Amino acid sequence: MAAKKGKGAKKAKVADQQSAAREDLIEDAGGYDWGWPTVDIVLANMELSQRLVAGGFSGCGFGLLPDGPPFMTLLGDDMGKMRSALALLKEWTTLSGPNAIRIEIAYDGPGYVLAISQQVDLLRWRVSGIDTISQPLMIVMSHIKRMNSRHPMLDGLAGYAEQPVAPLWLIVAEMPAGMSQSSGSRDFSFKPSWNNAILLPGIDVYRRLEDRPPHSMARTEAEFEARKKDGPDPGWPPTPDQDPKGVTDARERRLAASMPKTLHVLRNTDRGAALLAHAASAGYARWQAEQAICNLRTARFLSYQPSGIGKRLAMIDAVRRQILEPASMDVELTAISNDQLDEQIGLDAAFLLRRLEPDRDVGARVVERIRRVRELGYG
């Protein structure tokens, strides 16, 4: 049988991954450890590059105002589409502030490299939300333009950019006729369009390539070619922290951020004390009881109760990634029995053991699972 190729192979791979994830949910049966790391990735789209390319972006202009900060102009052949690109940049700043845009210039031979991208932290907040739960890996798209010459005014801008406060206007303009076909930098006059102009807090200008920080997006053509030759970075994506302390710290952070009301009621009411006392008498660690009770309560956040077990487990898994308990929410711990607590602690321990020792049977009895978790140093 012929091997699958192209889009069909990609779709099959995605389907296989989704099937495996569903099988894991079924096997875990509602068990979950909030400290076990997951790899989430946030990917920026190519919209800015698409708009700049459509606008025929081919050069930059720099200028001074009589009474104000300098300005930087993105020059293109189609003014309407260049305005569209600027409107998108304006949208980023409207959502996240002027720091949302990151502009870098790196000198390269007689010319320079310009990189326009998004500030990583602000991009993450816009795409994945402002919370303390998800810490996704970020893939940032940058529009990089290489200029074959450098106007002397750029040296002045480089000195200006080194000041603690160095604001700069960002605008767009139409490339003067014949300029894009000519070589070298030159002086020319034009009437700036201040519609949707963006006042940036500053830009980064690197006169030497070694001055760039490791995370700089301003890369030379030679560096891109070397990267293609070397292949993907073997250290990416990084391996999540799975050691006992890392898992413990992540668990405490995520539970406190997601289920603060449940933890407060559990630690400060008679019913909570009774559940914790039962857990202690059965030989469970306090964190195991607290986590199990939080897991039992996540079902309360479902928008409806589906009939299928697979659908229900998938909905609960989604809730864990976005839940934030309101302080006004009622937490009724009397609805949780000791038997339910025992069962959930066993499921949570099995969840952890399947990932620590995927080739070993987790054991049928809860006490066996708890003992093994402790032997591995996670109890």
Image (cartoon, rainbow, N blue to C red):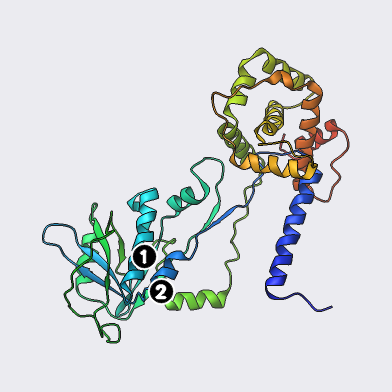
First in sequence: mark 1 vs mark 2 = 2
Image quarter hosting the N terminus: bottom right
At x 44%, y 60%, the residue is: 215
Q: CA distance from mark 1 to mark 2?
A: 10 Å
User: Residue 309's image quarter?
Assistant: top right
Q: Which residue is mark 2?
A: 54
At x 63%, y 22%, the residue is: 331
342, above or below 3, in the image: above
Q: Residues within 10 Å of mark 2 (few under 14, many from 20)?
A: some
At x 67%, y 12%, the residue is: 270
User: Residue 53's image quarter?
Assistant: bottom left
264, above or below 319, in the image: above
Q: Which residue is mark 1?
A: 84
141, above or below 372, in the image: below
- Relative to 64, is 128 on the left or the right? right
Visible in this render: residue 100? Answer: no
